[in-house]
Amino acid sequence: MSPIPMTDEECRVSIDGLSEQIDRYANLLVRKGVSLRRGQELVLQVPVERADFARRVVRAAYRAGAGHVTVLWTDDEVRRLTYENCELSFFEHTPSWQVEQLNSLAEDGAAFLFLEGSDPSALKGIDPAKPAAATRARNLECKSFRDGMDFGRNVWCIAGVPVQAWAREVFPDLSAAEALYRLWVLILEVARADGEDPESAWETHNASFEKTKRFLNSHRFDALRYESDNGTNLVVGLPSGHVWDGGAGRTQDGVTFFPNIPTEEVFTSPDRLRADGVVHSALPLVRAGQIVRNFWLRFEGGRVVDFGAEQGREVLRHIVETDEGSCRLGEVALVSKNTPIRRSETLFFDTLYDENASCHLALGMGFPECLMGGVSMSKEELEARGVNQSSAHVDFMIGTDDMNIYGVDAEGNETPIFVNGQWAWE
């Protein structure tokens, strides 16, 4: 029997009943996500529809001793209108005021908290070249801002907040009010913010990453081999001196923070020149408000040489052709199917969540911290050591319930890492 739908008033009361949990979530993002220090600037990017939650975060930040909070608002409708009415040439450069704003904040040591919440189909029908150009321009021209996060100079955290259009995409059979309530509940659950002490829960969760990282880092595999029944048959090389990371991050001056809330992945950067074979997607990819479904990529010598998609091939093409490095891998990430997000059996249509339900790869920029001594190297030195360089970094999910992954040593011997979608020792 189908569950009885909630009335709009019941949904309003139920969301009000989550108020204490939502406050604890705001505190978690400030105190653990970006580990805000007394006197530090916090930059908060948030959908205008969630101004109510933004105010909670701002209050939490000032209680934690923030020197100042800068709020940057986002809005799907304004974004779409901009793409509809401005020429492609407008997006090929970031406005100078925005370059100055982001770079100066990063140079002054600000913490950055990005709250995601948008309609997965907000830019349906928009020329994908426009958002691709805008992303590329910001990543290239806001250099201090981008390098501050890539090279461990600034703390940052990406987390989620529900908005109406996103909630209706995730729960299409529910009313708008109930969909929003259910998405709030789910976000709090998978972020481990639904208990009495989310901060302690995250300390415990972070400790769980250590055993896995020790195993992978001690074996020093030369490559990973992926196989699954959907046609994935891929070998990805790993550079000498690679480091597996996951859970909390750490800045160059020793501040511990959580770049993603939630997070379930252990990851490293592969050798940019060593990927061969075919990989098929396991979940849709949402990129700049457009959806790519049922796609595949063929690699030779580390480079994408062919690709296809049931839906969104042009979006995929613009990702692969963003720049010289966007057709190569910058990340390999391992995620067991036994995670809260996977167990929720919910497709979020948002990479932050869906990547934590599935093993994934990323095209584009690699991670300096995933190479011994990498944070002290130049981009040219990192590239020479195999860590990919690009203005893009696009995660896509490949983990299926039957996926097997093997660690391959320098002599070609294989050690099972994943068996049927989960860690070999689970």
Image (cartoon, helix red, strand yellow):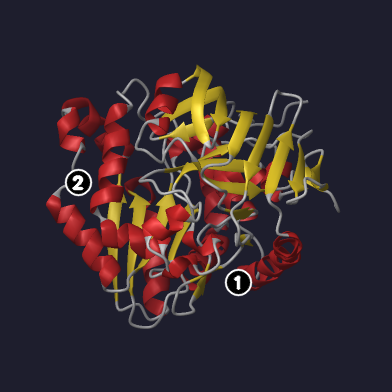
Residue at image point 19% right, 46% down: 94
Question: What amino acid type should be assigned to the residue bearing mark 2?
Answer: Thr
The quadrant holding residue 364 is top left
Of the numbered discs 2 and 1, the one sitting upstream in the chain is 2
Q: Position of residue 132 (x, y in %)?
A: 32, 34
Q: Position of residue 386 (x, y in %)?
A: 51, 51
The quadrant holding residue 398 is top right
Residue at image point 27% right, 31% down: 130
Q: Residue furthest right?
A: 425
Q: Residue furthest top?
A: 310
Separation (CA) of disc 2 from disc 1? 37 Å
Q: Depth check: 309 or 227 in front? A: 227
Give the crowd class for mark 1: few <14, some 14-19, many >=20 residues within 10 Å. Answer: many
Question: What amino acid type should be assigned to the residue bearing mark 1?
Answer: Glu
The residue to which callout 1 is attached is: 199
The residue to which callout 2 is attached is: 94
